[in-house]
Amino acid sequence: MARRIVIAPDSFKGTIDAADAARAIEEGWRTIRPDDDVLLRPMADGGEGTVDAFAVAREGAERRRVTVTGPDDRPVEADWLLYLDPAGRLTGLVELANTSGITLLDPLRPFTAHTRGFGQAIAAALAAGIDRLALAIGGSSSTDGGAGALAELGARLRDADGRHVPDGAGGLELLASVDLEGLAGLPPAGASVLTDVTNPLLGPLGAVAVFGRQKGILDGDAPRAEAALARWGELLAEATGVDPSTPGAGAAGGTGYGLLAWGAELERGSAAVGVELGLPEAVADADVVITGEGRYDGQSEAGKVPAYVRGLAEAAGARTALVAGAIAADASAFDAHASLTDLAASTEEALARPREHLVAAGAALARSLGS
């Protein structure tokens, strides 16, 4: 008898994205149970690969190609996604990682990298007549507070002499005024920012202190970058009333704060992404739900994808399965589980050929849960 199987993994960081992981697990499952109705709902964390995951999960989603200014001013070809959200609203998903992301830089540019490309892609989505925006802001390259994106949407950022300031955190050091009169309006149903980050803009838990080093801001330069963001925060707060200490304002080098000042709302956690993808509806009539991530450990139960997906599945009365690169915590809450490291016989082999071992994991779970 055919059953409905929902496959909803997160990405296996550094080895395979969520969409390809879901396809590999499906391939393995079908080698054992070819007649089952398999539905792919790859999850995303708002970083690189979010557009790809949504393109698989949202039926009828349409990729739109746009050429934008990358974080180091070189042109970048990127996709944003047009789809109907679970409420039937025409939604544009724009990903910061593929427009202004850190993987687009070599070398890092701590004071000149910017988010202009992200803003250009947002502008393209707005021009398409969407009802709402979904903004995935993981994987950022800059610490410009989202200034580049807002500038592309019509904000005017000037120095003391009335000139437009340069891009990046370095430009924020010269900032004397922020004029938002020409800033584009939000689409009719608003904008949702998808992020798990809850850091404020400034301070010991802020964008520079926590995320600056990964973007090339060395300890000696941190006070300079912090002062630049503080100046941005002060002027933007004066213009909009949005508090820089708002949780999530420090996401993506402060881009979270720029988007909050624009009027967007931060949607935090796996549940927000799951709702956007329509996962609760997909799981409602599932017989088996398979989820996964690169490493299942003690932090996985603290709001990460496997725990969230398992909760949905259990509420729907479905059996649950976990696939992970390595399982370093008790996984007995799942009905079945498979470790790529165990299947491959070594961590090195699992990392070298993740797709092959995800196929094997899918087959193993089909045998275990097939009856």
Image (tube, rainbow, N blue to C red):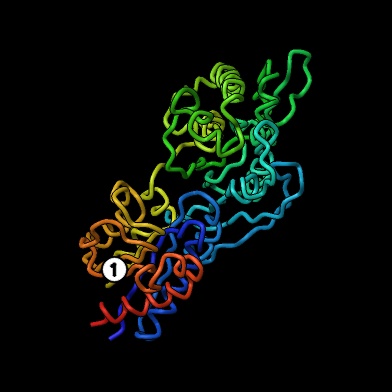
The relative height of residue 138 versus residue 61 in the rendered view (above or below) is above
Left or right: where 329 falls relative to 230: left
**Residue 67, image x, y percentages:** 73, 52
Given residues 161 and 364, the one toward you in this image is 364
- Position above or below: 36 against 240: below
Asked if residue 284 lies left or right of residue 82, the reply is: left
Point out the image quarter for the N terminus: bottom left
Q: Is 29 above or below relative to 295?
A: below
Toward which corner of the image does residue 31 lie, by quadrant? bottom left
326 with respect to 45 (left or right): left
The answer to which of 216 and 37 lies nearer the viewer is: 216
On the image, numbered disc 1 is attached to which residue?
A: 337
**Amino acid type of the residue tagged 1 in the rendering:** His
Q: Residue at x 34, y 73 (%)?
A: 5
Quarter of the image for the C terminus: give it: bottom left
**Foreground of the two, 250 or 186:** 250
Name the residue at 28% across, 59% down: 310
What is the count of numbered marks? 1
SS under mark 1 = strand
Task: Give the farthest residue toward the top.
Answer: 160
At x 32% / y 61%, what residue is drawn?
A: 327
Residue 347 falls in image quadrant: bottom left
The image shows residue 255 at horizontal and vertical percentages of 56, 35
- Neighbourhood count class around disc 1 (C-alpha, 10 Å): few under 14, some 14–19, many 20 upward: many
**Left or right: residue 64 compared with residue 327:** right
Indicate the position of residue 47 as horizontal and vertical percent values: 52, 49
Q: Position of residue 201 (x, y in %)?
A: 50, 27
